[in-house]
Amino acid sequence: MRGIYTAVGSMLVNQVHLDVISNNLANLKTPGFKRGEVVNRSFPETLLHYQGDRALAGQGRLSAGLILAPPLPALRPIGVVAENVAVDAIYHMNQPGALRQTEDPLDFAIQGNGYFVLETPDGLRFSRDGHFHLNSEGFLVNSQGFAVLGERGRISLAEQHPQLYGDNDLYLNGQVVDRLRIVAFPQEALLAKDGFNLFRETGNQVPLPAERAVVRQGYLEESNADIVRQMTQLVTVRRTYEAAQKIAQTYDRLLGRAANELGSLR
Amino acid sequence: MLSSLATGYTAVRGYQQIIDMVAHNLANTNTIAFKERRLSFHELPVETLRQRRLPHTGNNLPEPAVGTGAAPAALKTFYATGALHFSGNPFHLAIMGEGFFAVTRPDGSQAYTRAGAFSLDAAGNMVTPGGDRLAGVPNFHEEGVDSSEGTISIAPDGKILFVTSTADGAFAQETLGTIHLYRFTNPQQLLPRDGSTLIAVEGSGPPLQGVPGGGGFGEIKQGYLEKANVDLSQQMVALVLGQRSLQAAARAMVVADELWALTLNVRA
């Protein structure tokens, strides 16, 4: 009867799949969004043995007292089972999204690996979303109002039309203001989503300057979630869930028959 | 399934707003000096599987977490200058570049606009179609200017000249005033008012005055009007993407509903 737990486990895991797909579909138009992907893992597999004869043989020996019992039959393996299934990890896929031209001088996109660095009250956060604007004090900020950091700290731009040249240097009226700080991590899997298109570092890694990242001005990086992939996964989830539900239903019928029909005097 | 429905709801609401925004942009393709609106999204905070009490192995860091949808992050106005088209009306002005005209509203407060479809009202003021006076321009009647005797000329640097021809065939010109332009550190925060005018608020920073054609300000072109900077084909693409994305998100909600029905039917 342990299969009923596996069936229910599969239903719960598919629910997580659906949650992730829904979130990916909600973020088709979110700049710098990285789609989530679920990895399942079954519980450790165990080898089952048939031991019905052994049990009977053992009983025979007990009841027979000193009489020698027949030799125990060898254990007969039936097969392997895994007791249940669970979510092992939800990864965000780091493939870059397509760059879309916006012609807005305060939109930026990173080509290649790397993240913009933002200063938040909770510490540094990292993002691929370069949809920036100037706040009333003239600092370059993201949609949340967090300051975008350059190599010298916050970037102060007095006007709306900075130019980006060379190694991600921001110019204003022909004068260098600062260089956009773009960082990379040796283990990107240790970045966790923090909401609002920000990533948080969870493994005490030191952000390294991203050598090969090129920033494009007037472009935004589109979401890397695509409708086709998500709709296909939606179908898979729908049918897998249905299959697991059928198994749970079968167990329900079996239990019903066991409870009501076994030993009935009819 | 409940959380998937909630996530789907944020998606449908967001894509609906994209469609609303496209409709607004399309409705204003013929509005003078209209600036395209752009909506940007961000992902909503994640919830860990531990918080949701869903099965996970706990083998991997960071903890597996699921996003909860998307929400509009910023409604940006795209301030690129629109195409100028010739109207021939001497009271029509266009700014070729950055800057706003300042206008005085009937209640005496200051507002800003790029829509330069001015006209001369019965009292002799240069006003917007909404009746707001263009700042820096004197009352023409008080100055004794009669437009039948000469022409009003507005130079690229904002100087208003009244040019008359004298008896000996030469031209005489009289300076009546100067139109200044204004800009803001954060024009995204300017508060829209009726009739294409904007109001300065704390978040936009104070208005910075300048002479047209200098210091980053655009030149004034008399007899021209600035068209909307909306790109029709781009809006059509945004409309299709918004609509299809909405359908996909709604489809995920339907599947969540179906899974729920299946769950209720386990006990057949």
Image (tube, coloured by chain):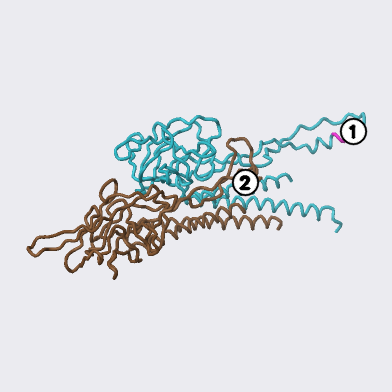
Chain colours: A cyan, B brown
Where residue B33 appears, as percent x and y from the top left, is 32, 59
For badge 1, the amino acid type reads: Leu
The answer to whether the residue labelled 2 contacts the one labelled 1, judged by CB atoms less than 8 Å apart, is no
Instruction: Give the residues drawn in magenta, as a range.
Output: A58-62
Q: Which residue is mark 2?
A: A13
| Quarter of the image where one finds residue A59 | top right
For badge 2, the amino acid type reads: Val
Q: Which mark is residue A208?
A: none
Quarter of the C terminus of chain B within the rendering: bottom right
Question: On the rendered structure, is B187 left or right of A28?
Answer: left
Give the SS element for disc 2. helix
Residue at 84%, 31% (x, y): give it. A70
User: Which is nearer the eye, A197 or B200?
Assistant: B200
From what the image shows, is residue B256 above or below residue A83? below
Q: Residues within 10 Å of mark 2 (few under 14, many from 20)?
A: many
Residue at 18%, 69% (x, y): give it. B148
Give the main secondary structure of the magenta stretch: helix
Q: Which mark is residue A62?
A: 1
User: Which is nearer the eye, B30 or A213?
Assistant: B30
Nearest to N terminus: mark 2 or mark 1: 2
Where residue A65 appears, as percent x and y from the top left, is 92, 31
Give the SS element for disc 1. helix
User: Which is nearer the eye, A238 or A144?
Assistant: A144
